[in-house]
Amino acid sequence: MNSESKQLIAGLKLYLTYLKGLGITELPLSKKQGQISYEPELSDGTEVIAESTSLDQTQVSLLANQTLEEIRKELGDCQRCKLFKTRRSLVFGEGNEKAKLMIIGEGPGFDEDLQGRPFVGKAGQLLTKILQSIGLQRETVYITNVIKCRPPQNRNPQPDEIETCYPFLLKQIGAIEPKVICALGTFAAQTLLRTDAKITSLRGKVYPLSGIQIFPTYHPAYLLRNPDRKREVWEDMKRIAKALADNRS
Ligand code: URA
């Protein structure tokens, strides 16, 4: 059994335990007896990964009772982890509160820390262009990061920093209730999907989480260093555009 299958089974076990805790002891079967019902592929051929346990409906709807303004207020002058000591700004996120598409990056860099806004440096300019490539203006989506404060010297976010910020990210997702989330890079993808799998194996697929479709793809900062990967991001963006079009009501 490969590590992805093992992870899937571990996730499924957790989910079943969780459901049992909620008093659910039976699961519906699909038309084909004995198979759990989920579409293995989107109509464009994108592989759909079985419902994950990370962000289920209950979690998101329970968290949907706060507005972005209230969540920002609750964060306040956050000192919940060590990053407050070195940050200039807490970069909460910005964009359309009713966005169908939410973009989640890793964490603020130098420019973001300076300006207090997400994705405003070189990677951010590339992100703006990538969004435009599928006909989206930056203002129409909501952009935030897994962690809200810049790590010193732009080092990787540490597990305690990610876990401290995670409830606030979930609340933001709950407030916006996007149809689609684009997880940019390893940290966003791994945090949302609760996995250690590499971004190379996560991207190119869709992970449905109770009404939200999560599409991991490469981080624009990675693309700046590896422009030959742009093609794959373009493929992912086309999938996102299609998911958004399918969700237009
Ligand atoms: N990289 C990120 O992940 N987020 C930003 O806001 C900027 C750069």
Image: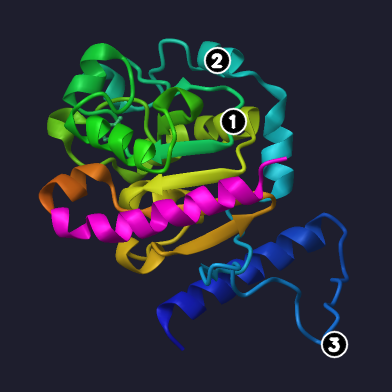
Q: Position of residue 67 (x, y in %)?
A: 64, 18
Residue drawn at point x = 61 percent, y = 26 percent: 98
Disc 2 versus disc 1: distance between alpha carbons? 11 Å
Q: Residues within 10 Å of mark 3 (few under 14, many from 20)?
A: few
Q: Residue at x 26, y 13 (%)?
A: 115
Q: CA distance from mark 3 to mark 1?
A: 37 Å
List the residue tagged with mark 1: 171
Q: Is mark 1 within 8 Å of ligand 1?
A: no
Under circle 2, the secondary element is: helix
Is residue 216 among the parts visible in the rendering?
Answer: no
Q: Amino acid at mark 2?
A: Glu
Q: Which residues are magenta?
A: 227-249
Is residue 100 shown left or right of residue 4? right
Residue bearing mark 3: 33
Rendering coords of residue 191 (x, y %):
44, 49
Which dot, 2 or 3, sits closer to the camera? 3
Q: Quadrant of residue 30?
A: bottom right
Residue 245 belongs to the span the image colors magenta: yes
Above or below, 170 relative to 95:
below
Label 1: state its secondary structure: helix
Q: Residue drawn at (57%, 52%), measured in percent from left and top?
A: 243
Q: Is residue 50 magenta?
A: no
Question: Which of marks 3 and 2 precedes in the sequence?
Answer: 3
Mark 2, mark 1: which one is toward the viewer? 1
Answer with mark 2 or mark 1, whichever residue precedes in sequence.
2
The front one of 142 and 6 is 142
**Residue 213 visible, this angle:** yes
